[in-house]
Amino acid sequence: ILKFVPFFIVWFSIFMIFYYLPNGKVDFKSVGVGSFCAAILWQVSRYVFINYHPFNVKYNAIYGSFAKVLLVLLWIFLSWFMLLIGAVIAHEIKVLKYGRYKYKYKLGYFNIAFKEYIFLKIILYMIAQI
């Protein structure tokens, strides 16, 4: 059971990001599947990164600590890429289940058009004060 605790922590964290971060309604099951896929991809890439890390000794001889910086940047890029893959999977599952435009006008009170309206009112108010 202790071997699966890090996976569940990663899955739960990604699930919370996918469920609470979007500006709109999301489906619980599609977010669960998308976050599960992203967590599996992230754990596999973490395993590959940890096992590859000792084999870059020849790069350390040539580049020094600059090789570590490049590996960390590559790791950050791949991590965000896997999160985006999971988000796309969750979105496409929702689209397959409900159709593309089910939630088009049900984004809540603070939807994007309302945010733009408030922003434009603030800008016009600031211009009027000049």
Image: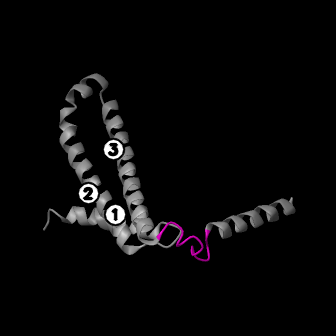
Please tell me the numbered disc located at residue 35. 1
Give the residue type at disc 3. Trp
Give the residue type at disc 1. Ser
Spot occupied by residue 75 in the image (x, y as percentages of width and height):
33, 44
**Vertical relation: 126 (above or below) 52:** below
Tell me which segment is drawn in magenta.
99-111
**Residue designated by label 2:** 40
Spot occupied by residue 57 in the image (x, y as percentages of width and height):
20, 29
C-alpha span from label 2 to label 3:
15 Å
Q: Is mark 2 on a helix, strand or loop?
A: helix
Q: Is mark 3 on a helix, strand or loop?
A: helix
**Residue designated by label 3:** 75
106 is within the stretch colored magenta: yes
Mark found first going from the N terminus, 1 or 3: 1
Mark found first going from the N terminus, 2 or 1: 1
Mark found first going from the N terminus, 2 or 3: 2
Quarter of the C terminus within the rendering: bottom right
Q: Quick one: label 3, few (<14), some, or many (20+) residues within 10 Å?
A: some
C-alpha span from label 1 to label 3:
19 Å
> Looking at the image, which residue is at 81% across and 65% down?
125
